[in-house]
Image (cartoon, rainbow, N blue to C red):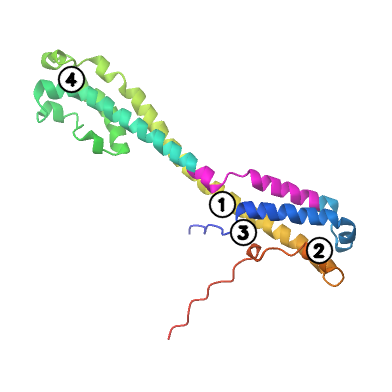
Amino acid sequence: MKDKAPQRNGALSDADLAADCDERAAACETYAAALAEEGLTPKMVADFRKENAAFRKLPTDDNLAKQVTAAVEARDAALEAARTGLRKASQPIARAHGDESPEYRSFDVGEVSRKSVPVVLNLLQTVPGVAAAYLTDAKALAEGFGPARLAPLPALYQELFDREAAIGRLETAAQLGTRTRVLAYNALNTRCADLCAKGYDHFVETDALAAKAFVRHPASHPAPPVVPPAAE
């Protein structure tokens, strides 16, 4: 069974959570002496600040999506280059024998602009073998066919293969990155709530202004579960 993607345990944006945590950390430092009675230590606040700093450095979903988009654009450029290479390899055969001839059709590159990445990769491997039979074909040679037409195909294959593989790696990295960021968000939000509880509980009966420093934005709290309406 596929794991459910974790959900953020608050409605604050990532940037707003980080800013909120900076404010709460400052409040903890301001009232550190009083909150020692609640078990707050300088190390706890320092660790909280480190956790927040690490959270800020995590790549955002937008950062990760842009990496995937760039990889797709690079793959598409490699795909078009590969299609062009296949056209150049087969065009002399079409001119020599006709684009409906068995000779040309044996290359299987008709409408290559519509062929998918897997099909183009396969053609880049099969065309050199098919084309070898025409390296001594007088008609094809007269139209400019020769080894130079086939020479670029292996490199075009490798480039397209590598670019396609890179997309898969980056998509996986993006999914893992999003999961990591959500889990870090939840841990940081929970840590902030715990520290604020110490401050609020300590001051709520004695110092309203100090207590207010530990009151968080309502969006930091998890939204109540949505209960579907009862069937009539």
Q: Nearer the viewer, mark 3 or mark 1?
A: 3
Q: Can residue 170 be seen at all in this image of the molecule?
A: no
Q: Nearer the viewer, residue 119 or 16?
A: 16
Q: CA distance from mark 1 to mark 4?
A: 53 Å
* Sequence-wise first label, 4 or 2: 4
**Which range is magenta?**
45-65
* Sequence-wise first label, 2 or 1: 1
* Sequence-wise first label, 2 or 3: 3
Q: Nearer the viewer, residue 165 or 232?
A: 232
| Badge 4 density bin: few <14, some 14–19, many ≥20, Cα 10 Å | few
Which numbered tag is attached to residue 12? 3
Amino acid residing under circle 1: Arg
Query: Residue 127: image x %, image y %?
Result: 24, 26
* Sequence-wise first label, 1 or 4: 4
- Residue corresponding to mark 4: 133
- 182, above or below 202, in the image: above
Q: Nearer the viewer, mark 2 or mark 1?
A: 2
| Badge 1 density bin: few <14, some 14–19, many ≥20, Cα 10 Å | some
Amino acid residing under circle 3: Leu
Q: Nearer the viewer, mark 1 or mark 4?
A: 1
Query: Residue 198: image x %, image y %?
Result: 80, 64
Q: Nearer the viewer, residue 43 or 161?
A: 43
- Residue corresponding to mark 1: 179
Q: CA distance from mark 3 to mark 1?
A: 17 Å
Secondary structure beneath dot 3 equals: loop
Secondary structure beneath dot 4 equals: helix
